[in-house]
Amino acid sequence: MSDVVVITGANRGIGLELAKKYSQRGAHVIGLVRESSSELSNCAAQVIEGVDVTDLESISQAKSQLQCESIAILINNAGLLTAESLDDMSFERIQRQFDINTLGPLKVTSVLLPLLQPGAKCIMMTSRMGSIADNESGSRYGYRLSKAALNAASKSLAIDLKPKGIIVGICHPGWVQTEMTGHTGHLTAPESASALMDRISEFTLETTGTFVHSNGERLPW
Ligand SMILES: NC(=O)c1ccc[n+]([C@@H]2O[C@H](COP(=O)([O-])OP(=O)(O)OC[C@H]3O[C@@H](n4cnc5c(N)ncnc54)[C@H](OP(=O)(O)O)[C@@H]3O)[C@@H](O)[C@H]2O)c1
C-alpha cells in the first residue's frame, strides 16, 4: 500500500486541500471527519465519519475501522476559532476551543500512536496566534490559549516520541481563505496546502518539535 496519510477535519478548508493534494500524489488518504463532503469522498481512499476530536470513543471507533496497518503522516488539522474579547468573554467558547484545539489533537495522537512507526510524522496544525512572543494585537482569548497549549503539548510529544523515531511538526498554515477566516487572508487553501506539504516533507528527527510557518519561517514561541 502507498503511504497512508490520515487527516482530521478533512471535509473542508485546509484539511480538504491537503487530502486532495496528497491523493493526487498517490498517497492513501484517510479523512477523519464529523461529516464528509462530496469533494472529500471523491478524492480520499477512505472517509470515516462521526469522528469528533473531543470524543475519545469516536476516535477509538475510527481506529478500529482504519483500512491500514500503519500511518506515515498523521495531520491533526481540525480546529475552531471564535472571538473573545474583554467585552465579550465567553468562558464556554474558550473551553470549547481548548477541547477541540488542544485536547483534540492530543486525544487523536494518543489513540493512533500504535500505528505510527519509526519515520512516521505527526503534524500539528497550530497557529502563530498561539505564539506569545508574536502577540501584538491581544484578544482572541480561547484561540490563543488553546493554540499556545497545543504548542506546549506538541513540544512534549516531540521529545517523548523522538526515541521511537517519530517526528512531530508544528505548523502555522499562513493566513488562509477558509470558512474560519470568513474567506479572507493572504493564501488560498490550495496554496497553503502545497506550502505545508513542502514543510511536512522537510521535517526530520533533527528538526522535530520546531514551530514553522508554511512559508518556511521559524516562528517564536
Ligand atoms: N485559516 C487560517 O488562516 C488558519 C490560520 C492558522 C491556523 N489555522 C488552523 O488550520 C486548521 C484548519 O483550519 P481551516 O482554516 O481549514 O478551518 P475551517 O475551514 O473552519 O475547517 C475546520 C475543520 O475542523 C473541523 N472541526 C472543527 N471542530 C471539530 C471537532 N470537534 N471534531 C472534528 N472536526 C472538527 C471542521 O469540521 P466540521 O465541518 O464538521 O465543522 C472542519 O473540517 C485549524 O486547526 C486552524 O486552527 C488556520
Image (tube, rainbow, N blue to C red):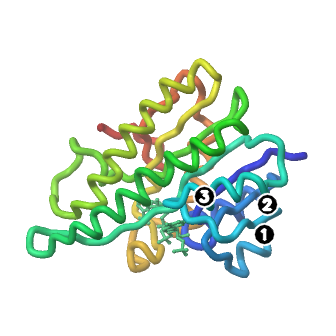
Q: Is mark 2 within 8 Å of ligand 1?
A: no
Residue 219's place in the image compared with 36, above or below, is above
- Residue type, label 1: Cys
Which numbered disc flags the more N-terminal residue, 3 or 2?
2
Circle 2 Cα neighbour tier, 10 Å, few/some/many (<14 / 14–19 / ≥20): few
Q: Quadrant of residue 189?
A: bottom right
Tags 1 and 2 touching, CB below 8 Å: yes
Q: Dot 3: what SS? A: helix
Q: Depth-wise, is mark 1 or mark 3 nearer the camera?
A: 3
- Residue type, label 3: Glu
- Residue type, label 2: Gln
Circle 1 Cα neighbour tier, 10 Å, few/some/many (<14 / 14–19 / ≥20): many
Per the image, the residue denoted by label 2 is 24
Q: CA distance from mark 3 to mark 2?
A: 31 Å
Per the image, the residue denoted by label 3 is 57
Circle 3 Cα neighbour tier, 10 Å, few/some/many (<14 / 14–19 / ≥20): some
Position in image of residue 109 (x %, y %): 57, 44
Q: Which mark is residue 87?
A: none
Position in image of residue 3 (x %, y %): 80, 45
Per the image, the residue denoted by label 1 is 43
